[in-house]
Image (tube, helix red, strand yellow):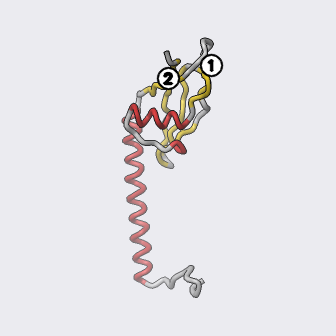
Amino acid sequence: MLPRGLAVVASSGVTAQAEAMQKKRALKAIEDKADAEEIVSRLDGIIIQISANASEAGKLFGSVGVAEIAQALQDQVGLEIDRKDISGETAKEIGTHQFTLHLHPEVEMQVTVDVQSEV
């Protein structure tokens, strides 16, 4: 492995550098978790409103999915959440629906989305 550059000899300098990198990653993880918890406190109790075309029976012409939720979060709350970090059943009817935001490996939250008919 050494000749191909896939490994290095564990000298004191390399060991110190590896420890410094581990500390830096640990501090970044703590900061990321704190940022995620701040987002949870900002979104606590907020209901996201989305308007969509629907029939008189309440069925949507199409659906409301994670892309629409991400856009609504950005428009209404000012948070840019990647749609890969949102999960839940696609909304196909008017009403309230629950989606899960995966903000950090240790921080998740439920967000309520109210889908209304466009008038």
Up the image or down, 44 lies above or below 55; here it is below
Amino acid type, residue under disc 1 in the picture: Lys
Q: In the image, 101: left or right of 39?
A: right
Q: Residue at x 46, y 42 (%)?
A: 81
Q: Which residue is mark 2?
A: 51
Q: Quadrant of residue 60?
A: top right
Up the image or down, 77 lies above or below 15; here it is above
Amino acid type, residue under disc 2 in the picture: Ser
Q: How many marks?
A: 2
Q: Which residue is mark 1?
A: 59
Please state, as top left, top right, bottom left or bottom right, where the N terminus lies in the image: bottom right
CA distance for labels 1 and 2: 13 Å
Nearer the observer, 11 or 48: 48
Of mark 1 and mark 2, the one earlier in the sequence is 2
Nearer the observer, 61 or 37: 61
Looking at the rendered structure, the secondary structure element under dot 1 is strand
> Are discs 1 and 2 less than 8 Å apart at CB?
no
Q: Position of residue 49 (x, y in %)?
A: 46, 25
Q: Residue furthest top?
A: 56
Q: Position of residue 3 (x, y in %)?
A: 58, 87
